Amino acid sequence: MQRGRTYSIFCCIGVYSAALVALHIPLYAQFLSTASEDSAFVRNNYTKAEVYIPMRDGTKLFTTIYTPKDASEKNKYPIIMQRTCYSVEPYGADKYEKLVSPSRWMMREKYIVVYQDVRGRWMSEGKWTNMTPHIPVKRAKTDVDEASDTYDTIEWLIKNVKYNNGRVGQWGISYPGFYTIAGALAQHPALKASSPQAPIADFFFDDFHHNGAMTLGYFFAFPIFGVQKTKPTTEPWYTMVQPGTRDIFQFLLDAGPLSMLTERFYKDNVFWQEMVEHPNYDEFWQKRAILPHLKNVKHAVMTVGGWFDAEDLYGPLNIYKTLEKNNPGTYNILVMGPFGHGDWSRERGHYVHSNIYFGDSLATFYQREIEARFFRHFLKEAGDGKTGLPEAYLFDTGKKIWRTFNEYPPKAARQQKLYLHAGGKLAWTAPDSTSQQLFSEYSSDPAKPVPHTEDLTTLFGITMRNYMTEDQRFAAKRPDVLVFQTDTLTEDVTLCGEITAALQVATTGTDADWVVKLIDVYPGWEPNHPYMPHKNIILGGYQQMVRSEIMRSRFRKSFEKPEPMVPGEITPITFRLQDVFHTFKKGHRIMIQVQSTWFPAFDRNPQRYVDNIYKAKAEDFIKATHRVYHSKDNPSYVQVSVID
């Protein structure tokens, strides 16, 4: 959901390699000292123009163009473009960005840098559409989508911007990442390189939903996406909700079911109402999915994501895999770092996510050694695909090192199952017939939901960030959270690739949510690192969430046609968690937690089946007893991909 354009303004000193970069210099002082240098560099080396570019249907899109001052007939530059719904500010021909292009490295190499307000946003004309549906076959000038707008924009730029070299690249993070991958379908001959970063792929599985469960953690973001503007503007035209309290957990709990939130805050919000009226994966959501259209992509693509991106992890992984499957022979690579949402675009020096320290200058390494190399090769150099970059550049979030792969997921990975056992045990072997405890059970009360975080400061905003690596000890202590863990590991265990949860469950209700969390349990003697953001946290015994996902029972057979559960009936619930690359080190333990509420990251399931949870009333919410079976006849497990 990345609002605005944020970039690295960190000055590199040191030697970089594919391993972790550790720079023993005053990182933050250097970071601060270069902000003014970057701003001066833009003014001294670029000229800015503001134009309206006409689309084929007559709609004009507001576009800013930064051209290097030394561009000439003998010194031509490629075009690098970002299309965004978050504004191309600052507006005004005499007002300059503090930094242009994806990073300060590329800014200094110089490109013709283009930013564009997409249809219906800010200074552009037209009507705004969330996740614009792609039209594969366009029969009329009125058949427009992000691919056609990208094509028309490139065509205009190539013909009208002086001293371009005829090559165009594009990039974007989050929603601009969606515009990048949708624009990759433009098939303009000048488009040579696209880098969708944290791209949205499907709103039913990305961002605003997870497996159809509503991401209530984005409650405050809806005005940004659900209010149409009436005229071109440089100022926000929407009004944000003012909760009147800093305790957002209690605010959302006291507000009641989603139907009450609709009535109190968003009955006129177009996007919220679209979600209310389309609770299932119907045609409305299906036609907004970009994955089915990722065919015949001929130019180079580098998809980028963060392993701990709380917004868009589904998107980059599935876009890369779909491109790889549908476009054999196309240059298509994947980069996954230890980052939260978009954090590779801004250097922080010592990179810490929640309480976990992953290394120094990681964003700078990515920007200089991966991103800049990719675009340079395809936009300035031979463009023959011999970039020196691997098929997959992945960060092991347990060992905290970059590794390269010739294929992803690795074909050599072994599919193994971690079985849930009686007494809270987790093991690689299946339960046998001698177990006396066939299931574990807990009472789930929607009125007292399990929090998704202990850090209430992360709830006051339009997005969630840190919970993806947060300590889960607070959850493990609750009676409505099941905990299963291995014995202490006697050797490293590295998971790389896909994860599937396969539970055998039963409930006294007729619907339920199932949250499965994969957790790295640190040894009790683990020391704190020097950059701990929360001084009251100790890493000894820390339960670091590595991966997690939610599944709504009603969708267990079909996301299009939900159906209730039968009370007391043992029912299989199988769903994918997103991929992982993490080494559980010797001396650690692997833990699985199972729960049925995860608030306010996700809305509460009434646990009594209703046709539309968005319209459920307070009286529809009931307590229910849930069972998770771990017997020989009804085993529950998490299937993982193990590599050496």
Image (spheres, rainbow, N blue to C red):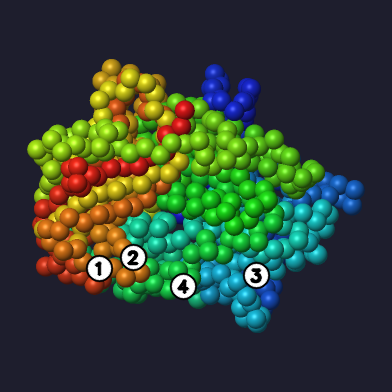
| Residue 330 visible in the shown view | yes
Q: Are marks 3 and 2 in contact (CB under 8 Å)?
A: no
Q: Tell me the residue that label 1 is attached to.
A: 563
Q: Which mark is residue 148?
A: 3
For the residues labelled 2 and 1, the Cα–Cα distance comes to 8 Å
Q: Which mark is residue 228?
A: 4
Residue at 40 percent across and 62 percent down: it is 204
Q: Amino acid at mark 1?
A: Glu
- The earlier-in-sequence mark between 4 and 2 is 4
* Image position, residue 149 (x, y; %): 64, 68
Q: Which mark is residue 558?
A: 2
Residue furthest out toward the front: 433
For the residues labelled 1 and 3, the Cα–Cα distance comes to 39 Å
Asked if residue 184 is positioned above or below residue 55 in the image, the reply reads above
For the residues labelled 3 and 2, the Cα–Cα distance comes to 33 Å
For the residues labelled 1 and 4, the Cα–Cα distance comes to 35 Å
Of marks 4 and 2, the one in the foreground: 2
* Image position, residue 339 (x, y; %): 47, 39
**Label 4 environment density (alpha carbons within 10 Å; few <14, some 14–19, many ≥20):** some
- The earlier-in-sequence mark between 1 and 4 is 4
Circle 3 SS class: helix
Q: Amino acid at mark 2?
A: Ser
- The earlier-in-sequence mark between 3 and 2 is 3
Circle 2 SS class: loop
Judge from the rendering whether residue 154 lies leftward or rightward of residue 347; answer left or right: right
Residue at 83 percent across and 46 percent down: it is 70
Judge from the rendering whether residue 296 lies leftward or rightward of residue 468; answer left or right: right
Q: Which mark is residue 140?
A: none
Judge from the rendering whether residue 27 lies leftward or rightward of residue 188; answer left or right: left
Circle 4 SS class: loop
